[in-house]
């Protein structure tokens, strides 16, 4: 297909596709003439991945890392998950004290060597942010967070496809990036539902018609 057909099939404007080509995110098509190239289903799939990542707020640089993980995945499943997370996790900050973070994630079953430093540093960064703001978690909140996150992780890891490394990478990488906004949105809805049950519905909110 021509680039115009690729655009029509994916709903991505031609100038945007050309930008992704220049950035090396989308591989070049097969040249049929000096100014024309043919694109196939692989380009459609890759373009949809790129759009999903960028729409989810992933930067061009991070998207490039994610695509690299898709193109050259490690064979080991544990390394695969680490590679996927490394593409979307800020680098480790050696100035952070990991003690509180390690104590917290022990509630997830964590032991030294079980996960990358970068994700531990992210927990430490979040805990430090709470401390700097003088914000205390509600009594009993952290154990609930830990149990909920472990339940979510168990379901997600059980769902990693085993038919190919490529399928596993795609599932892990895109799941890490695209599911987190859903989890955050569901948390906000749940908070408002719980608040409505405790304090009454929002002022001026309409009752659902029946």
Image: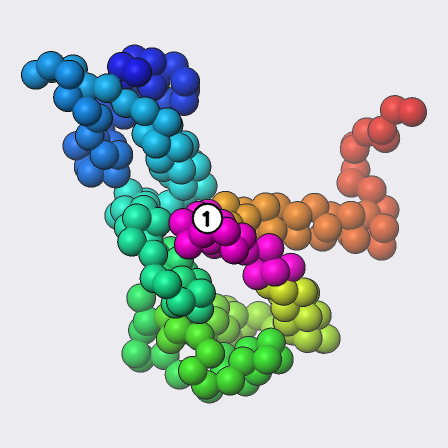
- Residue 27 visible in image: yes
Left or right position of 20 against 66:
left
**Above-or-below relation of 133 to 168:** below
Check the image and report above or below for 54 versus 36. Answer: below
Q: In the image, 146: left or right of 88?
A: right
Q: Residue furthest left?
A: 34
Q: Is residue 157 magenta?
A: yes
Above or below: residue 178 compared with residue 133: above
Quarter-of-image position of residue 43: top left
- The residue positioned 36% from the left and 22% from the top of the image is 12
User: Which residue sits at x=25%, y=38%?
Assistant: 25
Residue under label 1, please give it: 167
Tell whether 165 sits left or right of 192.
left
Name the quadrant of the C terminus.
Answer: top right
Q: Is residue 14 left or right of residue 28?
A: right
Location of residue 203 with respect to 170 vertically, above or below: above
Going 30% across and 78% down the picture, which residue do you hit?
Answer: 94
Q: Which residues are magenta?
A: 155-174
What is the x, y in percent for residue 8?
38, 14
Nearer to me, 30 or 199: 30
Mark 1: secondary structure: helix
Q: Position of residue 85 (x, y in %)?
A: 41, 60
Residue 128 visible to the viewer: no
């Amino acid at each position: 297909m021509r680039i115009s057909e690729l655009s029509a099939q994916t709903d991505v404007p031609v100038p945007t596709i050309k930008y992704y080509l220049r950035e090396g995110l989308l591989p070049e098509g097969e040249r049929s003439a000096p100014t024309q190239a043919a694109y196939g289903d692989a380009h459609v799939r890759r373009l949809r991945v790129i759009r999903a990542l960028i729409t989810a707020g992933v930067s061009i640089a991070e998207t490039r890392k994610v695509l690299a993980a898709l193109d050259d995945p490690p064979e080991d499943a544990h390394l695969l998950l680490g590679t996927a997370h490394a593409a979307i996790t800020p680098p480790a900050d050696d100035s952070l004290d990991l003690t509180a973070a390690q104590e917290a994630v022990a509630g997830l079953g964590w032991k030294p060597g079980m996960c990358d430093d970068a994700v531990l540093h992210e927990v430490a960064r979040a805990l430090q942010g709470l401390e700097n703001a003088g914000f205390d978690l509600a009594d009993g909140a952290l154990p609930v967070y830990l149990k909920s996150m472990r339940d979510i992780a168990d379901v997600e890891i059980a769902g990693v496809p085993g038919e190919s490394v490529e399928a596993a990478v795609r599932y892990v990488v895109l799941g890490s990036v695209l599911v987190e906004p859903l989890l955050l949105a569901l948390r906000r809805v749940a908070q408002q539902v719980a608040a409505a049950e405790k304090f009454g519905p929002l002022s001026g909110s309409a009752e659902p018609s029946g």
